[in-house]
Image (cartoon, grey):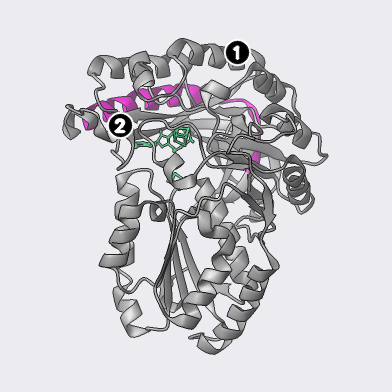
Amino acid sequence: MPDNIISTNSVSEKQSEYMNLTAEIMEIRKRGEKPLAYIRTYGCQQNVADSEKIKGMLAKSGFDFSDTPDDADFILFNTCAVREHAEDRVFGNVGALKNLKRKHPQIVIALCGCMMEQEHIANRIYNSFPFVNLVFGTHSLHHFPELLYNSLVNGKRIVERGNDDKKVYEGFPVKRDGIFKGWLPIMYGCNNFCTYCIVPYVRGRERSREKNIIIGEARQMIKSGYKDITLLGQNVNSYGKNLDNGVNFAQLIKEIDSIDGDYWLRFMTSHPKDCSKELIDTIAESSHISKHLHLPFQSGSDRILKAMNRHYDRKKYLEIINYAKEKIDDVSLTSDIIVGFPGETYEDFKETLSLIREVEFTSLLTFIYSPRVGTPAAEMDDPVSADEKSKWFRELLDVQEEIAAKRCSSMVGRVERVLIEGKKEKTDELNARTSGNIIVELEAPQELIGTFQNVKITKARNWILKGELIR
Ligand code: SAH
Ligand code: SF4
Ligand code: F3S
């Protein structure tokens, strides 16, 4: 058996006992009427989904939730390590808790997530912030109740990281943040080791959840009214590679798609090297899968793609994109891009610009390269200045703004089915989203939040659409 074959374990009864014990302790330790927890999540949807499990475990441990740390008995930051900026925000925000802890020493302050799986960061937190009680990494989630209980009863500081046992844990109580939009993790970890990326080091090797467990959870979500379900993984389209039942990602989504109901199915993130024609055909033929493909290409230059260890070139990427455009009616394409990878020249960068012009993406997530300790790219020569990279970055944004505006204007006059998601801040308008993941603002009664409606697109403002409800 390859050593990444996993077995499935359930969050044990022992952990349930710890949740009960914590509930008893918190009845005595609480500051207000009920024990309160404040959870702040940084980073990607994987972290959001992990926080939903933590909230589920906290709810079973007697906690309610607060949207400020000020009145909380338990404060947790679930951190992200993907870029330096994300880490800096965490350090700043943890530092700001010092006075609160001084005033109320019984508060438990905890840090978890991707940053904590890096030894130098866990050490820095331990040494710089003596008021932090508990530090645990992404591999310790399944016994969080035990860690919290221990931290409450013995008062000692706890640090736990590097606990990668290659298992998939099931049976978490999940407290989802949304009632009609929800995340459904289908796999964890990543095997790709793109040379710039910290994720494989902090989330461990790829491991897929059992198909029947995923289908059961999807069925339950659809039954309880979820309208927009996103399947999650660092590389969703390599789903199943480490399972022995031969199911691949296209087959998995085909099966979920066959569940009756009024819902959209999304997924992220797909890797171009694993994006098969079978997957695109499945999207094209499905009833529920949104006509949206988020396919990060990172760079338009073959030289840089090679240095990034991405395992595809520009030609292969465009082949997939053209196949998707041909098969999926009005497909909406989005991507992630890194500007200023070590050794990238302006010539390379121009290849990225020409690729976005050629594809005409609906929207892009764009990042300036950030060196990550322990990754190969952090050791590469990086002669281009930060100022120069910022200039390229702005040029990229300008080009994309033009493309998005053109794409959005072409939708004016059309009727689109949208999911109404919520109220827009400081106005009476509501926000909605198309199947292609484009935001539409419209005037409509608030009771329609959480429902699908048909909307006539009346205006386009950059990458946002305005629409009128059709009753
Ligand atoms: N697994 C996903 C996304 C991972 S992180 C994928 O492969 O697409 C999300 C995005 O952050 C990446 O797509 C990449 O564009 C960006 N990113 C990752 N590491 C980075 C780094 N060191 N500097 C800048 N951007 C980075
Ligand atoms: Fe990082 Fe690459 Fe894995 Fe995505 S596929 S998480 S960018 S290593
Ligand atoms: Fe950040 Fe971890 Fe996600 S590093 S991007 S939260 S997997």
Whether residue 413 appears in magenta in the rendering, the answer is yes
Q: Viewer-proximal residue, 50 or 447?
A: 50
Q: Is residue 465 left or right of residue 453?
A: left
Q: Position of residue 365 (x, y in %)?
A: 42, 34
Mark 1–mark 2 distance (CA, rounded to whole Å): 32 Å
Q: Is residue 250 left or right of residue 392?
A: right
Q: Position of residue 125 (x, y in %)?
A: 31, 62
Would you say the magenta stretch is mainly helix, strand or loop? helix
Q: Residue furthest right?
A: 260
Q: Quadrant of ligand 1?
A: top left
Which residue is pictured at 81% across the width and 34% down the height?
258
Q: Which quarter of the picture shows residue 456?
A: top right
Q: Viewer-proximal residue, 419 or 314?
A: 314
Q: Amino acid at mark 2?
A: Ala
Q: Which residues are magenta?
A: 390-419
Residue identified by numbered label 2: 377
Of tags 1 and 2, the one toward the viewer is 2
**Disc 2 C-beta below 8 A from ligand 1:** yes
Residue 378 in view = yes
Q: Amino acid at mark 1?
A: Tyr
Residue 66 in view = no
